[in-house]
Image: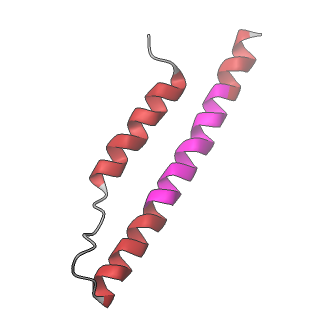
């Protein structure tokens, strides 16, 4: 049975694959803006998932007591 951390890590990996990272070859201003927004978006998703994950683990620990 996979642990919670493994599950959340897999979710993050799948999300990372969904958000395209822009190729570094042709650097234009437009591409740079896109990659910056992708990084922000990825960071926001990771943060929200972490917060939700922490909340879930907190609830689970509380129930186990």
| Quadrant showing the C terminus | top right
- Is residue 4 shown left or right of residue 51? left
Q: Give the range drawn in magenta.
A: 42-57
Asked if the magenta segment contains residue 53, the reply would be yes
| Quadrant showing the N terminus | top left
- Is residue 20 shown left or right of residue 10? left
- Is residue 52 shown left or right of residue 18? right
Seen from this angle, which residue lies furthest front?
A: 25
Q: Which residue is drawn at 39% across and 34% down?
A: 10
For the stretch drawn in magenta, the main secondary structure is helix
Q: Is residue 39 above or below residue 14?
A: below
Q: Residue at x 33, y 76 (%)?
A: 34
Residue 6: x %, y % from top left: 47, 26
- Is residue 1 shown left or right of residue 54? left
Q: Please tell me in which quadrant of the rendered image residue 13 appears.
A: top left
Residue 56: x %, y % from top left: 61, 30
Q: Residue at x 41, y 72 (%)?
A: 37
Seen from this angle, which residue lies furthest bottom?
A: 29
């Amino acid at each position: 049975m996979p642990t919670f951390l493994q599950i959340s890590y897999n979710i993050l990996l799948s999300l990372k694959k969904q958000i395209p990272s822009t190729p570094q070859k042709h650097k234009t201003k437009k591409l740079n803006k896109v990659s910056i927004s992708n990084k922000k978006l990825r960071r926001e998703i990771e943060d929200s998932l972490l917060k939700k994950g922490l909340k879930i683990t907190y609830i689970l620990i509380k129930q186990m007591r």
